[in-house]
Image (spheres, helix red, strand yellow):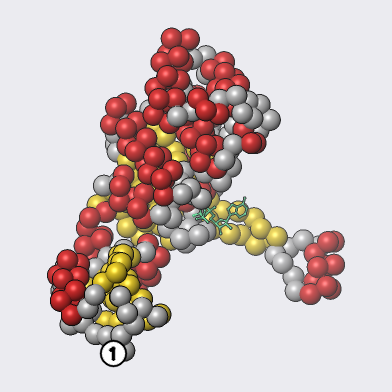
Amino acid sequence: MSLIEVNHLSKEFQVTKRQEGIRGALRSLFHREYTTKLAVQDISFALNTGEIVGYVGPNGAGKSTTIKMLTGILVPTSGDIRVNGITPYKERQKNARQIGVVFGQRSQLWWDLPTIESFELLRQVFQIPNDRYRQNMARFCDILGLEEFLQTPVRQLSLGQRMRADIAASLLHDPVILFLDEPTIGLDVVAKERMRSFIQEINQERGVTVILTTHDMSDIEKLCKRMILIDRGQVMYDGELAKIKEKFGKERVLIIDLEEAIAGFSVNGAEVIKQEGNRQWLKFNRDVMSTSQLISQISEKYEIKDLSIQDPEIEVMIRNIYENGLD
Ligand SMILES: Nc1ncnc2c1ncn2[C@@H]1O[C@H](COP(=O)(O)OP(=O)(O)OP(=O)(O)O)[C@@H](O)[C@H]1O
Ligand SMILES: [Mg+2]
């Protein structure tokens, strides 16, 4: 038996039908019409202990809805979920003891209390033994640098501080599973990196199983071997990240700043897709030419001032899968 098992899971929402114009709006006041929104349709997957899985897909794909069902916040319309043997919505309390949850969009902490008070409250809620609580606090303070704002009310924390507090809070009671719904959203590059390292350490040090949703492919690349890609409530791909990148992520864009603007700039093996002043955008296929080959080819002819590489975006990969299928 796997640690997490999801079988033919679906979730429908009843949504009020919007009617056009003022007359429509007035009519809706007295006579509501509902339609059904299928947020999750027949999703199945299983996770083993110690995995970090990226749960990825475009806006509205059904990621958060899945996480909410796994945590017991939402009741599935049909299908089964087992989280370490527990059906989340049936035994929400019991499930809460074995999982940690972070919703990047909304803090789970007490907004008006000093941060430390939230931790203390969680200690009581989960009846965490004092010793263990102290150990965990020391460890999390150490890696996440929490001391500087422990006395600050949560509402006054910066986004990065708030996110660090939230993830520490989610792990105080030593859950075996961690659900992270966009834990790096809105963070700057340094804060993102810090969050990623922390997730990685917790996974390696404690064997915590992690499901992570994100729109940032660098999160996935740093943390996950496996990716589940969903779109419109359905699983499009479930497997190794490396395989899908191999197949769909071949196209890259090299952005270079030249010393001077050059008319008729061209390079073999790459296509100029955009130009702005001294800046050139070059699309190339990494099967045909490596990045370093391309760069050395350009620098033979031109003076390069600065450069960066755009990896294929998840949205582009998904569109690719849509258009060309998986085979
Ligand atoms: N409580 C709700 N009532 C009605 N519809 C909902 C509700 N929650 C989600 N939906 C709809 O279900 C679909 C899936 O939403 P969900 O929040 O799971 O997407 P997501 O993959 O997390 O997207 P995002 O990347 O934007 O966070 C969307 O079309 C959304 O509008
Ligand atoms: Mg979401």
Q: Position of residue 245 (x, y in %)?
A: 25, 61
Q: Is residue 163 left or right of residue 298?
A: right
Image height check: is 305 above or below 262?
above
Which residue was labeled with disc 1? Answer: 264
Ligand 1 shows up in which quadrant of the image? bottom right
Looking at the rendering, in which quadrant would you find the C terminus? bottom left
**Residue at 66% across / 26% down in the picture?**
113
User: Element under label 1?
Assistant: loop
Q: Position of residue 241 (x, y in %)?
A: 27, 54
**Residue at 57% across / 40% down in the picture?**
158
Image height check: is 212 above or below 28?
above
Image height check: is 21 above or below 142?
below
Corner quadrant of residue 210: top left
Looking at the rendering, in which quadrant would you find the N terminus? top left
Residue type at tag 1: Gly
Q: Residue furthest bottom?
A: 264
Q: Is residue 313 left or right of residue 268?
A: right
Q: Position of residue 53 (x, y in %)?
A: 34, 44
Tell which of 32 and 140 is nearer to you. 140
Tell which of 22 and 31 is nearer to you. 22
Q: In this view of the protein, can residue 98 be seen by the observer?
A: no
